[in-house]
Image (spheres, rainbow, N blue to C red):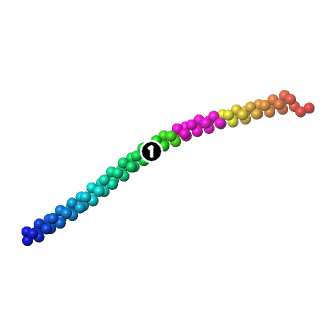
């Protein structure tokens, strides 16, 4: 009977040891995955910063283009008024 208890205890300890080994393996995999994800997150943050800068530059460029268009339209309107107002067709 003492042998039976000792054998059962060994089996239980072996199972516990295997399960702990599996858990340790899973933890190692999780740590590697976490490190990879942190690296990718850092890359995404850098890319987002570049995108923000590009958007800011585009907004400034768009603003400049709008003002150039407004000035061109005003200039053309003034030129038309001067041409047709002061120099009518004979």
Q: Is 70 left or right of 48, judged from the image as shown? A: right
> Quick one: which residue is furthest to the top in this view?
86
Please tell me whether the stretch drawn in magenta is mainly helix, strand or loop. Answer: helix
* Local SS, label 1: helix
Boundaries of the magenta span: 53-66
Residue 90 to residue 15: above or below = above
**Mark 1 Cα shell of 10 Å, populated few (<14), some (14-19), many (≥20):** few
Identity of the residue drawn at 84% across and 28% down: 86
Q: Does the magenta stretch include residue 56?
A: yes
> Quick one: which residue is furthest to the left in this view?
2
Q: Does the magenta stretch include residue 31?
A: no
> Quick one: which residue is furthest to the right in this view?
90
Q: Position of residue 77 (x, y in %)?
A: 76, 33
Q: Where is residue 17 in the image (x, y as percent from the top left)?
A: 21, 60
Identity of the residue drawn at 66% across and 34% down: 67
Identity of the residue drawn at 25% across and 58% down: 21
Q: Is 45 left or right of 55, judged from the image as shown? A: left
Q: Mark 1 points at which residue?
A: 43
């Amino acid at each position: 009977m003492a042998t039976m208890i000792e054998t059962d205890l060994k089996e239980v300890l072996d199972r516990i040891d295997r399960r702990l080994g599996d858990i340790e393996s899973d933890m190692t995999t999780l740590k590697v995955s976490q490190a990879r994800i942190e690296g990718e997150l850092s890359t995404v943050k850098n890319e987002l910063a570049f995108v923000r800068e590009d958007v800011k530059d585009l907004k400034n460029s768009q603003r400049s283009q709008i003002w150039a268009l407004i000035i061109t339209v005003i200039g053309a309107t003034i030129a038309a008024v001067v041409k047709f107002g002061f120099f009518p067709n004979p």
